[in-house]
DNA sequence: TACTCAGTGCGTCATGTGGACGCAATGTAT
DNA sequence: ATACATTGCGTCCACATGACGCACTGAGTA
């Protein structure tokens, strides 16, 4: 079995190719049907959900490793991906999780296995366009699916803490940086964008004030076309002005003092 | 020589007690004579300045490790200390730095030494009260001194990048959190606090507007005493209202949306 | 065809905050 | 006593924000 061989090699020789004690975990956010979603995986040999993660090659920059992990899980590249925190409680070890299925598949498990040691993980969060994500099973043969941010199952290790911190970071970033280019399709209506903001902030915003404020940033351009087929008035379609969007990304939106 | 033995043990057996490939570096900020200072060290066996750093014990939480490093270098504990970013360019290795003095002192250096491998470092920044810092020489026999943030010597590895990121983080935090309790003495004048803000933000602030805004946060209490001995009008002394200060720390000051 | 109605786009008003600056009070130097 | 730099407090205006009114659009319905 191919997958089996892959895992066997990973477990036995992973310490030859990867940095020891270090991993990367990605909180991948998507937006669909007015819900903020997060991508979770379930490994074949562990009956518990987890953030998609991976390891760092011995000569690989960590940002590159994060991008590789993201691509392996979602098929996406060149999306918004940012490191936000590093987690390192000493009890972060896979030792206490049942991985005995491995032995059934002929993979020997011993306590000194590199992957069972204490791990420190670098947290990244990504914003991806929901519809573009390809939920293919990957080499570690995982189940992989989207979960509403407000109904997340119990997670392995401290992954729940990582998710919370990622979400909190996202919420904070909203005050400085424009958010949306990576979460929404090419064109979208104003109310879709507002729903995104409301979901992240978890509060209602006044439709009219939102319109005014977001337009004042000058990162949106209104298209001449409108969205047809709606049961009511056809709303205008908008798209991001990438030039000004990126300028706002680097310069920031609100700065006190 | 005691120090020699210590280093010998560290180099030879460090991989027994510390997590491999991982280090902690601290950007320690202080404020003195209207200048923002940063604490730098120069190791005995390397002729280049560096951020004070250390390693993580195999069973030690990383925050605890950071606090330990801080205490070893400054004698301070329970100060403001926060993780801000993790740096991991693959060229972060001590291999290229001249450490041949070690061999003169009878310490064998070989390429496989754990400390010469690639390191990923977790960056912490600390705010400390300048006058309380005790610049004692520590066991690794370093030179240790304060440097003005605007005239930093060339640093080892990517430490300059770490300093810049720490400073940038500090500046950003200023918009959310009250800063000053850990950088200023118990009591201080309004203009001293303003100078601190001006130094961090690197711009002039209107004295009267600063007064109004900082007072609106209600984290300061004006003392009845005034600062005597000044050549002009005696300014009032202020101190932080710790209760409200800490509340502001957790709740934040400005939030848009 | 005329009407209903939810969603949309734009405007008004009150309130609050930030930047620029005036001015009186204070305490030391002369 | 007088000069003067520093300090504390107040005023004015521009602008952002929150609350909300209103007219418009276009599909569904009588």
Image (spheres, coloured by chain):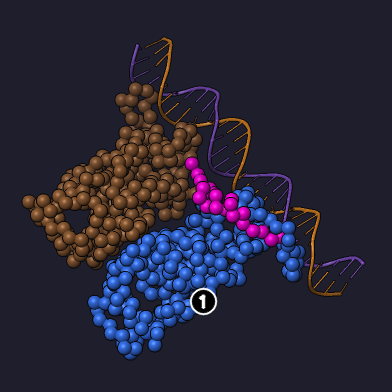
Chain colours: A blue, B brown, C purple, D orange
In the picture provided, is D1 more to the left or to the right than C14?
Answer: left
Residue D19: x %, y % from top left: 65, 53
A238 in magenta = yes
Q: Residue at x 36, y 63 (%)?
A: A60
Q: Is residue B36 above or below residue A69?
A: above
Q: Chain of mark 1?
A: A
Q: Residue at x 61, y 65 (%)?
A: A185
Residue A198: x %, y % from top left: 58, 62
Q: Is residue B220 visible?
A: yes
Residue A16: x %, y % from top left: 29, 72
Q: Residue at x 48, y 68 (%)?
A: A28
Q: Is residue B56 above or below residue A2?
A: above
In the picture provided, is B139 more to the left or to the right than D19?
Answer: left
Classify residue B202 by image quadrant.
top left
- Tag 1's secondary structure? loop
In the picture provided, is C26 more to the left or to the right than B109?
Answer: right
| Part of the protein shown in magenta | A236-257
Q: Quadrant of the C terminus of chain B?
A: bottom right
Q: Residue at x 26, y 50 (%)?
A: B52
Classify residue A184 by image quadrant.
bottom right
A129 in magenta = no
Mark 1, Cα crowd under 10 Å, few <14 / some 14-19 / many 20+, is: some
Q: What residue did someone put label 1 on?
A: A135
In the picture provided, is C5 more to the left or to the right than B235?
Answer: right
Q: Nearer the viewer, residue B97 or D7?
A: B97
Q: Is residue A161 visible?
A: no
Residue A81: x %, y % from top left: 47, 62
């Amino acid at each position: 079995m191919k997958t089996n061989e892959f895992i066997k090699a990973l477990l036995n020789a992973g310490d030859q190719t990867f940095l020891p004690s270090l991993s990367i975990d990605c909180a991948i956010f998507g937006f669909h049907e007015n819900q903020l979603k997060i991508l979770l995986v379930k490994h074949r040999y562990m009956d518990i959900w987890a953030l998609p993660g991976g390891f760092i090659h011995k000569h690989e920059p960590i940002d590159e490793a994060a991008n590789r992990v993201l691509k392996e899980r979602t098929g996406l590249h060149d999306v918004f991906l940012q490191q936000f925190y590093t987690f390192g409680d000493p009890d972060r070890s896979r030792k206490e999780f049942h991985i005995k299925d491995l032995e059934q598949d002929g993979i020997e498990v011993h306590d000194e296995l590199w992957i069972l040691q204490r791990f420190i993980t670098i947290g990244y969060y990504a914003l991806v366009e929901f519809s573009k994500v390809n939920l293919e099973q990957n080499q570690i043969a995982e189940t992989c699916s989207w979960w509403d941010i407000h109904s997340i199952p119990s997670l392995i290790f401290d992954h729940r803490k990582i998710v919370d911190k990622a979400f909190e970071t996202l919420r904070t970033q909203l005050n400085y940086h424009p958010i949306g280019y990576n979460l929404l399709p090419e064109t979208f209506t104003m109310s879709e964008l507002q729903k995104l903001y409301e979901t992240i902030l978890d509060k209602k915003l006044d439709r009219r004030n939102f319109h005014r404020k977001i337009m004042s940033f000058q990162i949106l351009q209104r298209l001449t076309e409108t969205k047809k087929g709606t049961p009511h008035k056809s709303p205008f379609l908008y798209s991001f002005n990438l030039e000004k969007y990126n300028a706002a990304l680097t310069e920031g939106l609100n700065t006190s003092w």
